[in-house]
Image (spheres, coloured by chain):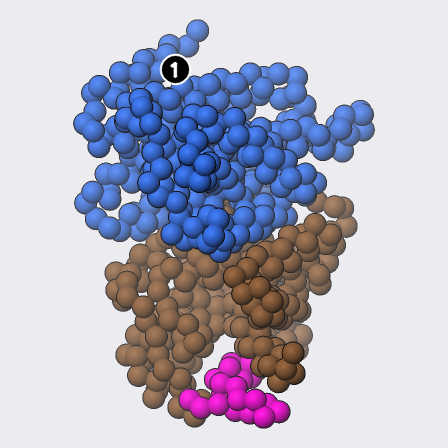
Amino acid sequence: MNPSLLLLEFMTGLASASSLFLLAAGLSLIFGALGIVNFAHGSFYMLGAYLLFWMTRGDAGSFWHYLLLAVAASVVIGAAVERIFLRPILRRPEHFQILLTYALLLVIADVCRLAFGSDYKSISMPPGFGGPVFFLGAPFPAYYAGLVGLAAVAGVLLWLFLHRTRYGLLVRAVTQDREMLEALGINVPALFTIVFALGIGLAGFGGAVSLPLQSMSTDVAVDAVISAFIVVVVGGLGSIWGALAGAFLIGEVQAFGALLLPEFSIVFVYLLMALVLLFRPWGLLGRAPAVRT
Amino acid sequence: MKVLPFAVLLLLLVLPWLLPAYGVQVAIQALVLAGFAVSFNFLFRNAGLLSFGHAAFFGAGAYTAALLMSKWGWNYLATLPVVLAVTALVALVIGFLSVRLTKIYFTMLTLAFAQMLWAVVHRWYNFTGGDNGITNVRPAGLLGTAHGLYYLSLACLVFVTLLLRVVVRSPAGYTLRAVRDNPVRVAAIGVSTFEYVLAAFVLSGTFSGLFGFLQLAWQRSVFPDLLYWTTSAQVIIAVILGGSGSTKWDYGPIAGAAVLVSAQAAVQSRTQYWPLALGLVLLVLVLFFPAGVVGLFSRAERRRAQEEELDRAAA
């Protein structure tokens, strides 16, 4: 097989991995800290894209600065949702949490339908990223490369936040022992709000930067949240590195699966998820529970 | 003897003669979802396992019947034994691989398997018709009529509810709940916990397939949607809306399904924003009424839900 074709496929996989990473990192962060499986995560991804579309009015010329604004709006919405809806149910059985986030999924989808209509929304490539770039002589859409860069920047910033700031330290601590943190006088509920807002901001960012590649409709949410689950389960629930590894694997499996068996590439993805769950239920990079749960 | 279940059953027996044609259609849908919910809740309540993959069995039941009818010209009722065998087999395979996990890992693994089945059905155009589905399959004779299908669905619901009730109250049912509450201790007295949970999983899955088979007769077509994760979410909503209920009696899921389906019919005839309405109701219910619809009327249910919450807070 032609090596430049393989490279192209690899880069395509990397581009979809980038968007998957942004989507899944927040989900993983939220599960790690709050212990909540957020079924509405894909909805915030979708909401980020809709916000960007609404702000730019479909004109890609002002893409970049509205992108920042859309992410900021996602963060604010995330903080509000955590305060109003999640805080009262954090100690309730998990099926209530699933039901609540599923209710949010339904509400957000219909609110978007009311506000933006049910037609497909898309936007052209932002300025400077319309043409191709060349890898070993093979043309490759510049925006794919830009997307990989953006995800890398977001990943590095996230790492710096988690490992080089006091709040990041607290976030990592709360995923391990909430009671101890409370005993030390840390305001854990406020920390949860920060984590949730950050996760939703990442999802909104992922959705917004995907808008030039994927036309948005209100159906995107249910598909996006499943992709995020797959990534997080493969990589390890609650682990950021896991989200990165999971996104990379899933992106590449999808890209090369499409090369081998175009019709069934999506089946490979679920197969990978099932295999990981069977042999390492806590995910590739997740931490095994001390007592098997 | 309690009077209420018999009064409800009597009402259900005469209901199709009181309702307009559209009402009977809604009632059939409610019976089918109720049966699916009872089957799902058997596992959820007694084994403590939240499956997010029951769409696989529901859809497998519908697709097995639809394929046999459309490809090989089988009679609708004749497909039933095959439907039960196929869904039992699907449940055995998925269950064998899944029930060794618990909690969120079990939920995610069942989700993965159901999505895998969905993906295959969705993409395998030559065999399943892909997202065009299989259309124009209708049962011949009496079962092709609304009243015939209504009574068949009612009979299946009553049969499954009573049978599962017997299982729940049998020694096996007690063992299952013991495994749920303390697997280590049950294993220590020499019980094979895996086998009990697997058997419950297969029973729950097979009956879900039975109601998938009825769903096919109701909608006279199948689409991959039946296997998508939102179908699994639908049955979970019905169960939690009604209240998962005490271990003794499964009326919560039935009430939940009835409320869900009739509310959907009522709202959809007025507005296209049914998901919004459902979402708002669920938000209110989850935030303020943890014991579900049944809990609105039953003090015992409310107390049980409260105790459950206290147990969790203490754990």
**Residue beneath the point at 55% across and 81% down:** A148
Quadrant of the image containing the C terminus of chain B: top right
Region in magenta: A130-150
**Nearer to us in this view, B162 or A95:** B162
Q: Is residue A230 visible?
A: no
Residue A42: in magenta span: no
Q: Mark 1 is on which residue type?
A: Pro
Quadrant of the image containing the N terminus of chain B: top left
- Which residue does the numbered mark 1 point to in the structure image? B5
Instruction: Indicate the quadrant where residue A124 lies.
Output: bottom left
Chain A painted colour? brown
Dot 1: within a 10 Å radius of its alpha carbon, few (fewer than 14), some, or many (20 or more) residues? few
Chain B painted colour? blue
Instruction: Indicate the quadrant where residue A284 lies.
Output: bottom right
Q: Position of residue A263 (x, y in %)?
A: 52, 61
**Residue beneath the point at 39% across and 45% down:** B134
